[in-house]
Image: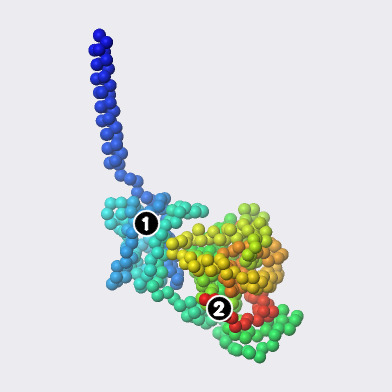
Amino acid sequence: MSRPTEIRTKLVTSRRRRTILKAGGTLLISVIASRPAQAAQIMAVRVWPADDYTRVTLENDTNLKTSHFIVKNPERLVVDIEGLELNATLKELVAKIQPNDPYIQQVRVGQNRPNVVRLVFDLKEEINPQVFTLAPVGEYKHRLIFDLYPVNPPDPIAALIMKGEWSREKPADTPAAPPPVAETRPDAAPPRSGAAEDKPSPLTRMITIALDPGHGGEDPGAIGRGGSREKDVVLAIAKRLKAKIEQQPNMRVMLTRDGDYFVPLHVRVGKARKVQADLFVSIHADAWIETTARGSSVFVLSEKGASSTAARWLARKENSADLIGGVNLKGQDKLLASVLLDLSTTAQINDSLKLGKAVLAEIGGINRLHKAAVEQAGFAVLKAPDIPSILIETAFISNPEEEAKLSDDAYQDKMAEAVLTGIRKYFAKNPPLAKNRMM
């Protein structure tokens, strides 16, 4: 074969190969393009009803794109979720809506069109919906959140009167007491040294105490080896303490949460300020990586850094509750957040230290103390600028022995009684006065 003929033959062969490869590549692209995208998977559905709002959570394996709108007469919230096929887990949402839900009558779930699921919430009243997503955190994967807030929210003062001063919700072992009378004593003498420590002086006006059971809802808090959840035990202790406080003359109580639902940290503080609380008491159960850690502690705010490495670590852990519980960052009042961060005063911290010392002394009578002194750190929930505030770690839920205590009715009652005695002794030395509130 001559040289020119050989060259021509190789060129023709090369062109044929390129044509075959091109055709094969086109076929491959066509096959890939025709393959449907894999739909997202709903892994869990949860509903958290509360007087403040109802939260619905869809936990899934990827970030979901949604659109929503309100339909009037009757009130409905319609949500379309893209990239989703209806599955058995999502259908469970229908049965999770309880008859006593304050805002949702029922929910309907269906495949609206290919790759789009539609949820229709039939509502009991007009609501302002917040629909947002949360990135994976802790043991949670991606979450799609629906927070349904009432257009006309409950008045906090009215709620305090209805649920606080005249409440009949008391532990079974606590005898009922008549409602306290708001008796004014302008001529009350100042407390005397010594005797006043054991017997508080008469209060000159009705005082309000904000009790803050930590965590709740999507945020379980620490979990003991026996399965006890921090959010449950601290709510039980807070309810016992509430009942005991309400038996005291001229005292009433506001709970930042009275059920299993999530309340953002700045909202907890805001609730206390709305009812012009005289004290803020946040109740928690500590945890550590070593099960041998034990004891009760009391913390107050610090403007100058934590009093110990452990206190700094604990504050960082407690402040992460918003990430786990799930806060809609776009919906936060940035002005309020800056006020709570910037206006913490030396006077508030000094009063908090006095309250903390009184409570710590009483807690030490029923449980070993983890630290003998009140500790300080930058806890976000203690940053009300005008309310003495403490955070109590009632025991280590990560310690099997103390976990058992925290779940025990008798220990819960003793803890509540100790905190009450500390509060009474604080007021014996620091009678409440009329205040100008920064509202």
Q: Residue at x 42, y 74 (%)?
A: 153
| Residue bearing mark 2 | 437
Residue 90: numbered disc = 1
On-image quarter of the N terminus: top left
Q: Is residue 114 above or below residue 299?
A: above
Q: Residue at x 53, y 69 (%)?
A: 339
Q: At which x and y percent is residue 114?
A: 28, 51
Is any atom of residue 148 visible in this view? yes
- The residue mark sitting in front, 1 or 2, is 2
Left or right position of 426 against 145: right
Q: At which x and y percent is residue 292?
A: 67, 55
Camera-nearest residue between 216 and 142: 142
Q: Tag 1, which secondary structure? A: helix
Q: Tag 2, which secondary structure? A: loop
Q: Is residue 177 above or below residue 304?
A: below
Residue 129: numbered disc = none
